[in-house]
Image: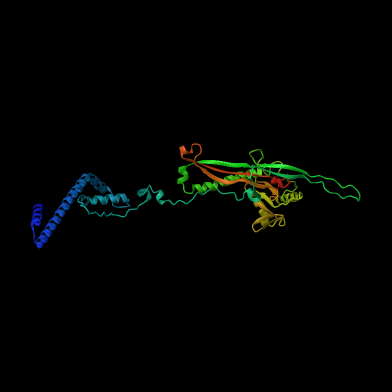
Amino acid sequence: MMEALDGLKAELKTATDAEMKKQIEAKAAEIEAKLEKMKEIDELKTEVKVLKDAADKNQPVIDKFVADGSKKSITGNRSFNDLLSEAISGSADKIKSLKKGQSVQLELKAVADMTFATNFSTADASVTQVRPGIIELPKRKLHIRQLLQGGGMSTSNFAYVKEVTGEEGPETVAEGSAKNQFDLDLQEVESPAQYVAGYIRISRKMLDDIAGMTTFLQSRLLELLLRSEDTQLISGNGTSPNLSGITDSGNYTAASTSETTEALMLIDAISQLEGYDREANGILLHPTDYWNLAKLTNLNQSSAVVTSENGVLRIGGVPVYRSTACTVDKYIVGDWVMGANLLTREAPRVEFFYEDGTNVRENKVTVRVEERVAFPIYGDNYFIYGDFGNAS
């Protein structure tokens, strides 16, 4: 066929008639098409031979499927894998004679029960739905800073001047007599700003790969900071770097009462505070003591003393606040507006540092939470501090 094609090409070169040239070209094109078809057939024969050789090599595996299949019972529940093996065994001859472009349809001879244990034992991530974010531990319902007047400061130390005594004053005087002389005693007091701070180190992998980790840290670390602040505001001992808290010596007056019921003890504390011309505008209790008082309202006992308005418990009209920052059986009746200020030099914040210590070498991140605050308490009789220990 190649010789015929070459002859036609030679005639084409010598032909002069246009119609003859056209016929020769058509015939040559037909021969070329047949040659291309023959090449494709040769290629297919080669592929068929490769497939047959591969089938011959896999004959032992197919024989094993057949042998295993003969041992199976055709009754009862069969696994999908067992039935698939039998289907392959039954189609062994078809598989061996496969040609290019052909396929074999495997028919399972019985219905199989597919289970995770049998057919998909590695299914963990595939069937898991993960809730976005990280569920953190509960936040404290009320922090002490929420009861105080806030403010700012621009230096490291806050100083104020207060009157120490004011018992002396003008007196009546007879006509022509000398007037009474008196004086005022003042004192300058300083309240330094102190750091409340801490840090953690976390791997960059954990920070980057756990969804919501950054948001969780920003929320949780601030909550832990405020809890430490609560401790300082209530019971800090004033020894640097501690703040001087409400129950530190010199910052409160001890409750004085002969009552043995909680509600009446608080009434005495309010009376005691007002005896110093202070304004009782808040009572702080632990939730346990708060709800013990609430029982009195529910039982209609001492209704003139314990009331509830718009969900707010009141003792003698003074609102009661509850927080786990307060110790069980302890109470603070105070003038929270005039008695103290929480002054902020550096606001609470969470910061991430990639270059700290060996972080770069170890792929870690330092996360710092801190604030700098001062807590001036302006006298020893703005807060009455007592104990329910003797209550009945």
Judged left or right of residue 28, residue 130 is right
What colouring style does the render use? rainbow
User: Where is residue 17 shown, x and y percent of the image?
Assistant: 8, 61
**Is any atom of residue 252 visible in this view?**
no
User: Where is residue 173 shown, x and y percent of the image?
Assistant: 88, 50
**Which residue is rendered at x = 54% and y = 47% of the image?**
220
User: Where is residue 81 shown, x and y percent of the image?
Assistant: 31, 49
**Is any atom of residue 24 visible in this view?**
yes
Which is more toward the observer, 194 or 224?
Answer: 194
User: Where is residue 379 shown, x and y percent of the image?
Assistant: 72, 45
Q: How many circles with numbers are drawn on the protein?
A: 0
**Which residue is rendered at x = 22% and y = 44% of the image?**
60
For this orientation, the residue located farthest to the bottom is 19
Which is more toward the observer, 6 or 139?
Answer: 6
For this orientation, the residue located farthest to the front is 16
Judged left or right of residue 28, residue 207 is right
Judged left or right of residue 349, residue 177 is right
Which is more toward the observer, 234 or 331?
Answer: 234
